[in-house]
Image (tube, rainbow, N blue to C red):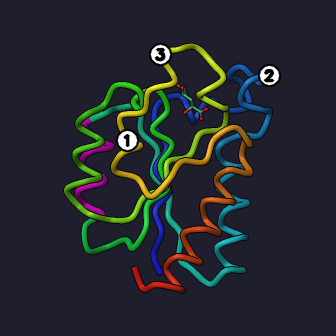
């Protein structure tokens, strides 16, 4: 069971960036917690962060036949990127969309997700716990249905 966590633009600024919206936990701390959880759940986990749309597309393509599941917080690209959407669709790797904030309770431009239609589901509004929920779901799905 190999799972890749993909973080998009400005997620590397967590802790500094709008703590009232995104919390005070850094991306590194979130990843460390996920590493511990992955170990408990018995899966391999890797991380990729980029501020560049094309690099995220490249990474999704490289994940083909390498990873069994993707967790993605595409950040602002969620709302704009047909390219990231198409890459997820192209590789057919089950994917969960994660957001720290509740994008549906924020500005109208954040209510639209280009990715939602090609993802298994979306978890948003629970801060870093959303990543941990997504990891638990991914592992359960992989164990139960051999996705
Ligand atoms: C975000 C929500 C996006 O609207 C925003 O652009 C982000 C972070 C979140 O995790 O809540 O950068 O994906």
Q: Name the residue under label 2.
A: 20
The magenta region covers 54-63
Q: Mark 3 points at which residue?
A: 109
Q: Name the residue under label 1.
A: 115
Q: Between 140 and 28, which is closer to the camera in this rendering?
A: 140
| Quadrant of the image containing the C terminus | bottom left
Q: Is mark 1 on a helix, strand or loop?
A: loop
Asked if residue 81 is positioned above or below residue 67 in the image, the reply reads above
Instruction: From the top left corner, tell me how far across and down residue 85 is, in percent.
Output: 29, 42
Is 45 situated left or right of 36 in this image? left
Instruction: From the top left corner, tell me how far across and down residue 101 is, in percent.
Output: 67, 32
Q: Between 35 and 110, which is closer to the camera in this rendering?
A: 110
Q: Between 7 and 107, which is closer to the camera in this rendering?
A: 107
Query: Magenta includes 60?
Result: yes
Q: How many labels does the image show?
A: 3
User: Would you say the beta carbon of the disc 1 residue lies within 8 angstroms of ligand 1?
Assistant: no
Label 2: how many Cα within 10 Å (few below 14, some 14–19, many 20+)? few
Is 133 situated left or right of 82 in this image? right
């Amino acid at each position: 069971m190999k799972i890749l966590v993909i973080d998009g633009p400005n997620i590397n600024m967590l802790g500094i960036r709008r703590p009232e919206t995104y919390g005070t936990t850094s991306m590194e701390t979130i990843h460390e917690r996920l590493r511990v959880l992955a170990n408990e759940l018995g899966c391999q986990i890797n991380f990729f962060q980029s501020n560049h749309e094309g690099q995220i597309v490249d990474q999704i393509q490289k994940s083909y036949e390498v990873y069994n599941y993707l967790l993605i917080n595409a950040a602002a690209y969620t709302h704009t990127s047909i390219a990231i959407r198409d890459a997820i669709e192209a590789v057919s790797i089950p994917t969960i969309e994660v957001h720290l904030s509740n994008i549906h309770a924020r500005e109208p431009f954040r209510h639209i997700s280009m990715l939602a239609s090609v993802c298994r589901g979306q978890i948003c509004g629970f801060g870093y716990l959303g990543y941990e929920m997504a990891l638990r779901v991914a592992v359960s799905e992989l164990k139960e249905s051999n996705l």
